Amino acid sequence: MKSIAFKSQIENNKIPIPTKHFADLKDMNLKDVRVIVLIEELEEFDDSAFNEFAQQFFKKYSSNLERIKSMIDNGKV
């Protein structure tokens, strides 16, 4: 599973993807994705802290991917 992380703002109930990530998503029209939205409260992350958090999150997520898929498929998440 591939992951990308970026900051954005919800606009008209949509989350715009920054232009610099368009190349990462090229040729992915109608491809299934899993989306996790982290909503900042009180400006708790600066960019470096967010990047570190994202790296750790995706590292843990990928190492537990099969277990997470099973939980989702069985309706436990």
Image: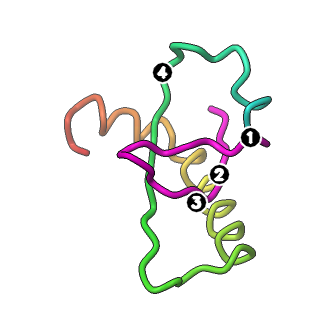
Q: CA distance from mark 2 to mark 1?
A: 13 Å
Q: Residue furthest left?
A: 75
- At mark 1, the secondary structure is helix
At which x and y percent is residue 40? Answer: 46, 73
| Lower position in the chain sequence, tag 2 or tag 3 | 2
Q: Nearer the viewer, mark 2 or mark 3?
A: 2
Q: Give the left or right position of residue 9, taking residue 28 as reference.
A: left
| Lower position in the chain sequence, tag 3 or tag 4 | 4
Q: CA distance from mark 3 to mark 4?
A: 20 Å
**What residue is at 49 percent from the left and 29 percent from the top?**
33
Q: From the image, tell me which residue sits under label 4.
A: 32
Quadrant of res 13: top left
**What residue is at 71 percent from the left and 66 percent from the top?**
51
| Lower position in the chain sequence, tag 1 or tag 4 | 1
Q: CA distance from mark 4 to mark 2?
A: 17 Å
Q: Give the left or right position of residue 64, taking residue 4 as reference.
A: left
At which x and y percent is residue 65? Answer: 51, 40
Q: CA distance from mark 2 to mark 3?
A: 11 Å
Q: Which amino acid, mark 3? A: Phe
Q: How is the image coloured?
A: rainbow
Mark 2 neighbour density, 10 Å: few (under 14) some (14–19) many (20 or more): few
At which x and y percent is residue 31? Answer: 53, 17
Quadrant of res 71: top left
Q: From the image, tell me which residue sits under label 2.
A: 5
Q: In the rendering, which numbered label is found on residue 19?
A: 1
